[in-house]
Image (cartoon, grey):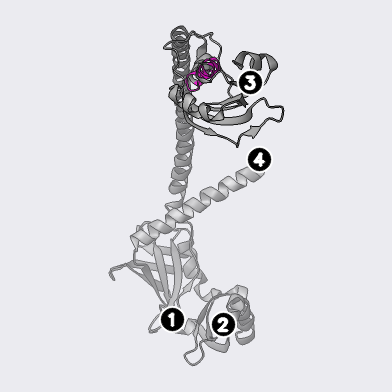
């Protein structure tokens, strides 16, 4: 597990370094130096076209003139200009566009078929572009340079860690398009840039840990402050609740019951009002009170007097017969049923412990109640 983590760390750092080097190269956009080969020496030309010195390949080895030329070429991009005769170029048969992913393998096979060299002994480049007369096919060409012809000139450059090395032919109008890239050594900025990346990542990790710890501490402080505020609010709520219980005896439930009682006519007051308003010739057999709606049934010898007497009492309104009166066979009078709205005045004050009418309809059907309601 540790080995995998270490490998992942190396890949991550190398990727960052490569990305930074690419960005630096794009930002610099430096023109390459040219190493123009001619017989036993090569002339070094700067990006501005001025002659900087030469590279001599002798039997004792290669050397730069002047000696500080090597230092000036370290980490630079170098184009090696070779004679046109050193590059072999051949057009191949066109292929389908769909074959593009396999084009390199196809060209490597063709190199060993059309040239006397093995692929491993050459530097090559695949050139391709769509055919003008058929966009679904690719025109393919290959440019090949034997490694043995340029090896002694490339060897001194390897120690300079050039950013890039390309092989180009002299006196060819299409030299730029047929340039063969053969890579280059690690840029001189790679090592210090790698150290800077590792240092930056370490600092970033430490900074993240410090900021995370500080945020955790701040979150704990905020939580403690919220808990303290909740405690203070709880104490204040308790004080307010005690004050409310002192101001409103019986608490919230009692207050609700008092409100419900005050919103409905009192049953005893309705019975008293009925007893005062009903004529002596009538008595009740049933009484129902639902909020302020009162329904009564009973017997009377004079039904026509009931409605006027109840409405004139001032305690009832909208008095009407709920059904037609019916004659009792035994000759005891007429059976009636009346509906009305109670407007019984309530007492100005009521003690908290006073009896409260039930929330539902109040029935008055017991024999004792009938006896009390009967005049």
Which quadrant of the structure image shows residue 99? bottom right
Give yes or no for contact between labels 4 and 3 (Cβ–Cβ under 8 Å).
no
Q: Can you say whether 344 is above or below 31 in the image?
A: above
Q: Most extreme residue toward the bottom, as rendered?
A: 133
Mark 2, residues whose alpha carbon is within 10 Å: few (<14), some, or many (≥20)? Answer: some
Residue 73 visible at all: no
Task: Provide the residue designation for mark 3.
Answer: 364
Q: Earlier in the sequence, mark 1 or mark 4?
A: 4
Q: Which is closer to the viewer, label 1 or label 4? A: 4
Task: Provide the residue designation for mark 2.
Answer: 97
Q: Secondary structure at mark 3?
A: loop
Q: Earlier in the sequence, mark 1 or mark 3?
A: 1
**Is residue 269 on the magenta stretch?**
yes
Q: Secondary structure at mark 1?
A: loop
Which label sits on residue 2?
Answer: 4
Residue 339 visible at all: yes
Direction from residue 278 to residue 51 in the image, left or right: left
Spatial separation of the CA atoms under disc 4 and disc 2? 45 Å
Q: Which is closer to the viewer, label 2 or label 1? A: 2
Q: Residue at x 50, y 17 (%)?
A: 273
Spatial separation of the CA atoms under disc 2 and disc 1? 33 Å
Spatial separation of the CA atoms under disc 4 and disc 3? 90 Å
Which quadrant of the structure image shows residue 364? top right
Task: Provide the residue designation for mark 1.
Answer: 83
Q: Earlier in the sequence, mark 4 or mark 3?
A: 4
Spatial separation of the CA atoms under disc 3 and disc 2? 102 Å
| x and y percentages locating residue 78 in the rendered image | 40, 67
Give yes or no for contact between labels 3 and 2 (Cβ–Cβ under 8 Å).
no
Q: Can you say whether 329 is above or below 238 in the image?
A: below
Q: Which residues are magenta?
A: 260-275
Q: Quadrant of the N terminus?
A: top right
Direction from residue 116 to residue 62 in the image, left or right: left
């Amino acid at each position: 597990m540790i080995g995998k983590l270490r490998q992942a760390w190396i890949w991550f750092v190398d990727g960052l370094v490569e990305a930074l080097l690419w960005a630096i190269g794009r930002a610099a956009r430096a023109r390459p130096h040219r190493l123009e080969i001619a017989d036993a020496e090569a002339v070094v030309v700067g990006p501005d076209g001025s002659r900087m010195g030469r590279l001599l390949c002798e039997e004792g080895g290669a050397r730069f003139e002047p000696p500080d030329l090597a230092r000036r070429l370290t980490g630079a991009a170098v184009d090696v200009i070779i004679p046109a005769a050193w590059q072999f170029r051949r057009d191949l048969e066109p292929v389908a566009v769909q074959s593009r992913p396999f084009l390199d393998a196809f060209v490597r096979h063709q190199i060993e078929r059309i040239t006397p060299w093995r692929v491993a002994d050459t530097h090559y480049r695949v050139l391709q572009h769509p055919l003008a007369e058929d966009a679904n096919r690719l025109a393919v060409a290959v440019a090949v340079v034997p490694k043995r012809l340029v090896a002694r000139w490339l060897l001194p450059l390897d120690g300079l860690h050039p950013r890039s090395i390309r092989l180009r032919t002299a006196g060819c109008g299409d030299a730029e398009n047929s340039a063969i890239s053969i890579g280059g050594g690690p840029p001189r900025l790679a090592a210090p840039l790698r150290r800077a990346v590792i240092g930056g990542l370490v600092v970033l990790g430490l900074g993240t840990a410090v900021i995370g710890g500080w945020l955790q501490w701040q979150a704990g402080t905020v939580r403690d402050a919220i808990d303290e505020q909740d405690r203070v609010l709880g104490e204040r709520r308790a004080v307010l609740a005690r004050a409310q219980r002192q101001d409103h005896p019986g608490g919230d439930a009692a207050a609700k019951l008092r409100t419900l009682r005050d919103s409905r006519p009192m049953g005893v007051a309705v019975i008293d009002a009925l007893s005062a308003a009903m004529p002596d010739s009538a008595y009740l057999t049933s009484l129902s009170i639902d909020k302020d709606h009162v329904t009564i049934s009973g017997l009377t010898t004079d039904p026509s007097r009931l409605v006027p007497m109840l409405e004139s009492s001032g305690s009832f309104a909208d008095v009407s017969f709920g059904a037609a009166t019916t004659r009792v066979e035994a000759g005891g009078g007429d059976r009636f049923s009346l509906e009305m709205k109670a407007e019984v005045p309530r007492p100005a004050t009521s003690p908290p412990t006073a009896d409260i009418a039930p929330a539902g309809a109040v029935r008055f059907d017991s024999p004792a109640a009938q006896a009390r309601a009967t005049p």
